[in-house]
């Protein structure tokens, strides 16, 4: 099984890759129900995002200056997207 390239950074800092199934199980435990990535309430339920962004930045920093998202595992750049979305939503 190919590892997922992100971890549950909303809930804890992880810098090791885990399989997709384990990632989904961890999210389900933290959310208190089965995790569904297409859940329309997920964005609202994952507010606030400060810890997740801090954890993502910390993970991102370990790969600098030679960051390659296609090879770094685990890896996320979602914090850049979230910041941009938040800029337009508030």
Image: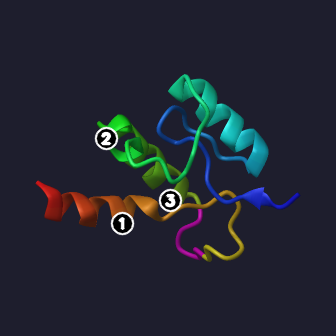
Where residue 29 appears, x then y in whole percent?
A: 62, 25
Helix, strand or loop for disc 2: helix
* Disc assigned to residue 61: 3
> How far apart are the two marked residues, 3 and 2, measured between alpha carbons?
27 Å
Where residue 69 appears, x then y in whole percent?
A: 61, 73
From this viewpoint, is residue 19 visible?
no
Give the crowd class for mark 2: few <14, some 14-19, many >=20 residues within 10 Å.
few
Q: What is the total number of numbered labels drawn onto the structure image?
A: 3
Is 36 above or below relative to 73?
Answer: above
Helix, strand or loop for disc 3: helix
Please say if the residues under marks 3 and 2 sit with CB atoms less than 8 Å apart. Answer: no
The boundaries of the magenta stretch are 63-67
Helix, strand or loop for disc 1: helix
Q: Quadrant of the C terminus?
A: bottom left
Q: Residue at x 51, y 60 (%)?
A: 60
Give the crowd class for mark 3: few <14, some 14-19, many >=20 residues within 10 Å.
few
User: Which one is earlier in the sequence, the residue at label 3 or at label 2?
Assistant: 2
Is 52 above or below relative to 72?
Answer: above
* Disc assigned to residue 44: 2
* Residue identified by numbered label 1: 81
> How far apart are the two marked residues, 1 and 2, measured between alpha carbons?
16 Å
Is 39 above or below relative to 48?
Answer: below
- Mark 1 or 2: in front is 2
Where residue 71 appears, x then y in whole percent?
A: 72, 73
Give the crowd class for mark 1: few <14, some 14-19, many >=20 residues within 10 Å.
few
Q: Residue at x 40, y 49 (%)?
A: 40
- Mark 1 or 3: in front is 1
User: Which one is earlier in the sequence, the residue at label 1 or at label 3?
Assistant: 3
> How far apart are the two marked residues, 1 and 3, measured between alpha carbons?
17 Å
Query: Any magenta on residue 66?
Result: yes
């Amino acid at each position: 099984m190919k590892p997922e390239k992100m971890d549950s950074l909303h809930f804890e800092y992880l810098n090791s890759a885990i399989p997709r199934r384990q990632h989904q199980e961890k999210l389900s435990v933290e959310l208190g129900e089965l995790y569904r990535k297409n859940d329309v309430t997920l964005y609202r339920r994952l507010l606030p995002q400060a810890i997740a962004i801090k954890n993502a930045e910390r993970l991102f920093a370990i790969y600098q200056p030679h960051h390659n998202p296609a090879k770094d595992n685990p890896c996320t750049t979602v914090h850049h997207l979230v910041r941009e979305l938040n800029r337009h939503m508030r």
